[in-house]
Image: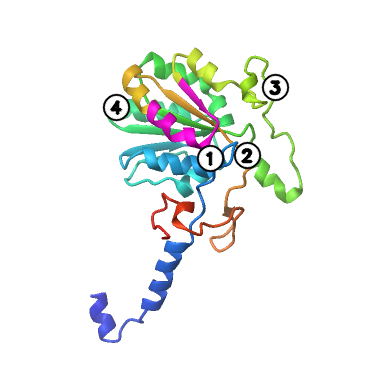
Amino acid sequence: MAREWQTAGKLKDRSAWLHDCQQRKASLHRKTHFDNVPVKPQRVYEEMNQVFGKDTCYVSTIGLSQIAGAQFLHVYKPRHWINCGQAGPLGWTIPAALGVVKADPNRQVVALSGDYDFQFMIEELAVGAQFNLPYIHVVVNNSYLGLIRQAQRGFDMDYCVQLSFDNLNAPELNGYGVDHVAVAEGLGCKALRVFEPKDIQPALRQAQEMLQTFKVPVVVEIILERVTNISMGTEINAVNEFEDLALVGNDAPTAISLLD
């Protein structure tokens, strides 16, 4: 009907605007392929897109990890992005993921947390071990309250948001504090830790294998750079970008519309 109306002159010709939108969609992608060590979070989501398929159900709560996840992760089906909405309940992710697995045991569940959200109710991992509720939990650890830190930038503050300390029992963490791998394993789950981008995808695939073998939650902790600002703004036309946009397809290889 729209084509008929357009032919009859009842609709404006918006083909130029449509072409412009298509060009923007194909070219204005955020870069994800960084080789930095410690890892930049954008690379984590790129690797997650490579490993997890269209049936994956993501569970996340709040923070820069959730905001970046919503920008970069591919979600293909209704009710496969389970989020707490506008509330800010740190710690919600673990029990929510366990609830999704219990409600739908056939669903491929992947949870996403920053380090503090993960710590908030980490003891609930024992429930997953006790009742054999397997899912993968990706923990992006920058040892910071990242969203609060980014919000403080406008006031030239960096106040009471650092979570780092030298863990005498885990010197390999280099000051990142809590040994999440040891805690998860102590609660009856399995856990892996990644320091370099090249190891992210192998760790995620290993976690998938461990799910099938052990039938318990598997934690994949990825050590991030301490400070990363994630794109956001108060209006859709006033979004602050902190990184360069992708220039070629290899800069954002899992973008929906490739550049090259």
Identify the mark nearer the N-term, 2 or 4.
4
Q: Tag 4 or tag 1, which sits nearer the N-term?
A: 1
Inspect the image, locate mark 2, and give the three-letter code of the amino acid beneath it.
Gly
Question: Label 2 near label 1: C-beta < 8 Å?
Answer: yes
Q: Secondary structure at mark 4?
A: loop
Query: Which residue is the site of mark 3?
Result: 166
* Disc sitting over residue 65 in the figure: 1
- Name the quadrant containing residue 210: top left
Say if residue 86 shows up in the picture.
Answer: no
Who is closer to the viewer here, 51 or 9? 51
Disc 4 marks which residue?
A: 105
Q: Does label 2 or label 3 sit earlier along the sequence?
A: 2
Q: In this rendering, which labeled residue sits more in front, label 1 or label 4?
A: 1
Q: Nearer the viewer, mark 2 or mark 3?
A: 3
Residue that mark 2 sits on: 146
Looking at the figure, which quarter contains the C terminus?
A: bottom left
Contact flag, marks 2 and 4 (Cβ < 8 Å)? no
Distance from the alpha carbon under mark 1 to that under mark 3: 23 Å
Q: Amino acid at mark 3?
A: Asp
